[in-house]
Amino acid sequence: MTFSLVSGFVRFVCAAQEPLVGGQAVMEGVMMRHGGAYALAVRHPDGSIVAERRPWFSLTQAPFLSKPFVRGFPTLIETLVNGIKALNRSAQQSAEGAGEEIQGWQLVMTLLLALALAIGLFVVAPHLMSIGMNWLKLGGGVEGLSFHLWDGVFKFLIFIGYILLISFVPDIRRVFQYHGAEHKVIRAFEAEGEITVQEAARYSRLHPRCGTTFLLFVLSISILLHAVLVPLLFMFWTPEHAVIKHAAAIVFKLLLMIPISALAYVLIGYAAALGDTWIGAVLRAPGMLLQMLTTYEPDTEHIEVAVAALAEALGEEAPERLRAPMYQPMESGTES
């Protein structure tokens, strides 16, 4: 059993990755990616649906950055960049064109702010809380295992608390409904049956390749690696000053994000590829449970937008089994 799992994992990692359909919920709409382009479908206040196809900003076109155990971090960055573009564009479209499209420097600043908030919430804050547990004599120093166990507990509590907190915002609740609609439509596409609003509604709103699951893999792997590698670092180099020691630990954790995200990207794909096997179900279960918080059951109006986004993303490659609702195509974006 162990040998077959390992050999299956090796085959998965070494296999050429076929283009998959992926998506993201946005303001009053859904973004769907297929190959080198993504489509954005948004419902206007008057009830009509508009959709446009745009080029996907990619870092993984470079041969080295597309290799297994490397492509995870570049994929994370390009997903953030395209996601911010899609969110901004959807907010503009849902207000029927009000406002200006995000400029290059604004995109960079938004990305840096998003990264700074993520680092503050999920790296710095848990580390400071773990220092507090050490002061309270409830945990050890940064060189010990207990410090990083506390760090992991606080990471998860902040992550779950953040999701629960934003779910009280009405606009975010609608985004979570579009998130569920996106998953249903992708499942209908992958099932190779009819892709209609009615058929998609029958499928689960949970999906094994969801970004929520990816984040959970990142958190889990980071806890394990931090608990092993940070103490190992201080076995070879231990600054005398406490502030420098903790600063070094935080910087080291940030550097570890590159291999952590790369490994998480491979594992989430492998867990999805395992299909209905018991080990696949075990690997997918925590992420699927977490999606119960980040997806809500969509209405017909949400699924209609998701189907329109898929149809626009596939373009001429759309199969005959896909029957999209009426929507207004827009001219393709010119962004690079």
Image (tube, helix red, strand yellow):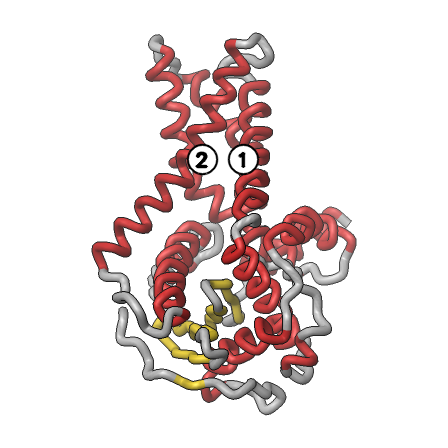
* Disc number placed over residue 309 in the picture, else none: none
Residue at the (59%, 86%) spot, across then down: 322
Tell me residue 331's x, y (percent): 32, 83
Query: In the image, which disc is placed on residue 121?
Result: 2
Question: The disc labelled 2 sits on which kind of residue?
Answer: Leu
Position of residue 325 measured from the top left corner of the image (x, y, whole percent): 55, 85
Name the image quarter holding residue 201.
bottom right
Residue type at numbered disc 1: Ile
Near mark 2 (Cα within 10 A), the count class, few <14, some 14-19 or many ≥20, is some
Horizontal arrangement in the rendering, residue 166 relative to residue 9 (left or right)? left
Q: Nearer the viewer, residue 327 or 146?
A: 327
**Residue at x 69%, y 82% (from the top left corner):** 193
Q: Would you place residue 60 above or below residue 334 in this image?
A: above
**Would you say residue 63 is visible in this rendering?**
no
Gap in angstroms between the C-alphas marked 1 and 2: 7 Å
In what quadrant of the picture does the C terminus appear? bottom left
Q: Which mark is residue 158?
A: 1
